[in-house]
Image: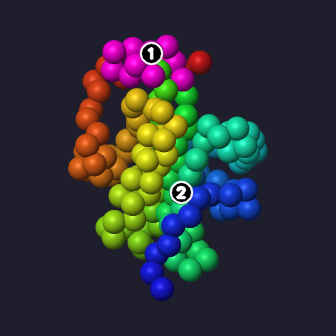
Amino acid sequence: MGITYRKLNEEDLDIFIQMRINQLREEGAKEDIDLTPALKDYYRRHMSDGTFVSWLALDEDKIIGTSGMSFVEKPPYFGCPSGKMGLLSSMFTDPAYRRQGIAKELLDRVVKEARAYGCGTVQITASDMGVKLYTAYGFIHNGNFMQYKL
């Protein structure tokens, strides 16, 4: 039958959250806290108000790939006159399905969602594994990104 794609819905959240946690662990997260309640709260709130969207890749009924785009707004600037930005997250493909174009298709679908929302830019903190995908898609490195943890 092949790989199919559809948007995330609330019934998918438990599996989606587990895949998000697996992704974070694969990327080297060491914290040992239960993120499930916070993630469930976040996704429910932001899916309902339209500021988070996700596309899923499925092999029959099995979710084998995920994507996510959070929409945020900040004061407009020259590089983004709308002030609307997409924050890309939750890009994950089951290891058995990698290198088949699934991540590229998921990325394309959430970037189109960001464009439709009116975003002027999309940002991601890319894992080493994802850099090649994002660079090939047209993302460029921004050496100015800094973070302060509270």
Q: Residue furthest bottom?
A: 1
> Closer to the camera: disc 2 or disc 1?
1
Q: Nearer the viewer, residue 19 or 75?
A: 75
Q: Name the residue at 57% across, 69% down.
A: 63
Q: What amino acid is at disc 2?
A: Trp
Q: Which residue is mark 2?
A: 55
Indicate left or right for 143 with 126 as reference. left
Q: Residues within 10 Å of mark 1 (few under 14, many from 20)?
A: few
Label 2: how many Cα within 10 Å (few below 14, some 14–19, many 20+): many
Q: Which residues are magenta?
A: 73-82
Which quarter of the rendered picture does the C terminus lie within?
top right
Residue marked by disc 1 = 76
- Dividing the picture into quarters, in which one does residue 73 lie? top right
Q: How many marks?
A: 2
Predominant secondary structure in magenta? Answer: loop
Q: Looking at the image, which is closer to me, 112 or 34?
A: 112
Residue 144 percent across, percent down from the top left? 31, 19
In reply to whether residue 77 is colored magenta, the answer given is: yes
Q: Quadrant of residue 125?
A: top left
Look at the image and tell me whether residue 134 can be seen: yes
In what element is the residue under mark 1?
A: loop
Report if residue 25 is visible in the image: no
Q: Position of residue 56 (x, y in %)?
A: 54, 62
Would residue 5 be counted in the magenta stretch?
no
Residue 30 vertical placement versus 93 (above, below): above
Rendered residue at 59%/59% (across/down): 7
Residue 49 vertical position relative to residue 82 in the rendered view, above or below: below
Q: Position of residue 89 (x, y in %)?
A: 49, 44
